[in-house]
Image (tube, rainbow, N blue to C red):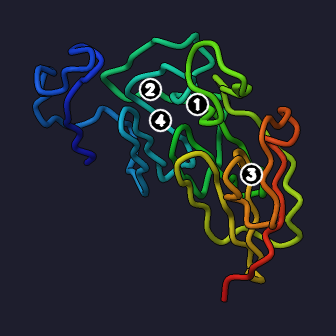
């Protein structure tokens, strides 16, 4: 069973203390959950059968449903474009790895705030399959603020999404990247042992 609960700051605007507190409840998911990944306003469940389910707030595509932003789901809903997933990580969106090595990512871009900005936004409302340049199977995948990393079986570390603060560990800082750069894994200078 997967128990879910929390608050809904969207209903309260910026006054989180006035947010509606949701009582704990059992999520209506049809098969055993093997992993979960949670961010401040959305959550993901990886099921035993390789499906991904999401729920929460979709202000930047983080639910992966392909629907327009501002949609909210209080209960889990399956992301139908994904199957046979074995790893999941989240931060401002999510990234998954399938059993045959496909990487997919979706969600909010941290490179730019909402509204007018000199920085581009790369919000992805649905899972976007990205080119997996890794030669070996992925062992771990993690997300942090606006970038994702994967470690393969030989310990190489690969990053994708944001690099405006040097998160990729390549020695470069890239501001205002195009979508191709944003969705292309890049090998870091360091190795995980």
Residue, disc 1? 108
Image depth: mark 2 or mark 3 in front: 3
Residue, disc 4? 53
Residue, disc 2? 77
Residue, disc 3? 160
Task: Tell me the quadrant of the picture where the C terminus can be found.
Answer: bottom right
159 relative position to 51: left or right: right
Q: Are marks 3 and 1 in contact (CB under 8 Å)?
A: no
Q: Pick whichever of labels 3 and 1 is earlier in the sequence.
A: 1
Q: Which of the 4 image quadrants contains residue 130?
A: top right
Distance Cα–Cα, label 4 vs label 2: 5 Å
Closer-to-camera residue (110/132) = 110
Q: Are marks 4 and 2 in contact (CB under 8 Å)?
A: yes
Q: Are marks 1 and 4 in contact (CB under 8 Å)?
A: no
Distance Cα–Cα, label 2 vs label 3: 26 Å
The secondary element bearing badge 4 is classed as strand
Q: Pick whichever of labels 1 and 4 is earlier in the sequence.
A: 4
56 relative position to 105: left or right: left
């Amino acid at each position: 069973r997967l128990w879910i609960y929390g608050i809904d700051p969207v209903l309260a605007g910026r006054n989180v203390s006035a947010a509606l507190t949701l009582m704990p409840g059992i999520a209506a998911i049809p098969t055993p959950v093997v992993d979960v990944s949670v961010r401040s306003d959305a959550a993901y469940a990886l099921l035993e059968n390789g499906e991904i389910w999401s729920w929460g707030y979709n202000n930047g595509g983080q639910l992966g449903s392909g629907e327009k932003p501002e949609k909210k789901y209080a209960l889990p809903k399956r992301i139908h474009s994904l199957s046979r997933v074995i790893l999941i990580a989240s931060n401002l969106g999510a990234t998954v790895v399938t059993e045959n090595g496909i990487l997919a990512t979706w969600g909010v871009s941290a490179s730019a705030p909402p509204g007018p900005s000199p920085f581009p936004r790369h919000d992805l409302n649905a899972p976007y399959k990205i080119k997996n340049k890794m030669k070996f199977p992925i062992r771990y995948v993690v997300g942090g603020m606006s970038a994702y990393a994967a470690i393969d079986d030989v310990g190489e570390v690969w990053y994708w999404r944001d690099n405006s603060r040097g998160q990729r560990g390549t020695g470069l800082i890239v501001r205002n990247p195009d979508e191709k750069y944003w969705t292309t894994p890049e090998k870091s200078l360091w190795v995980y042992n």
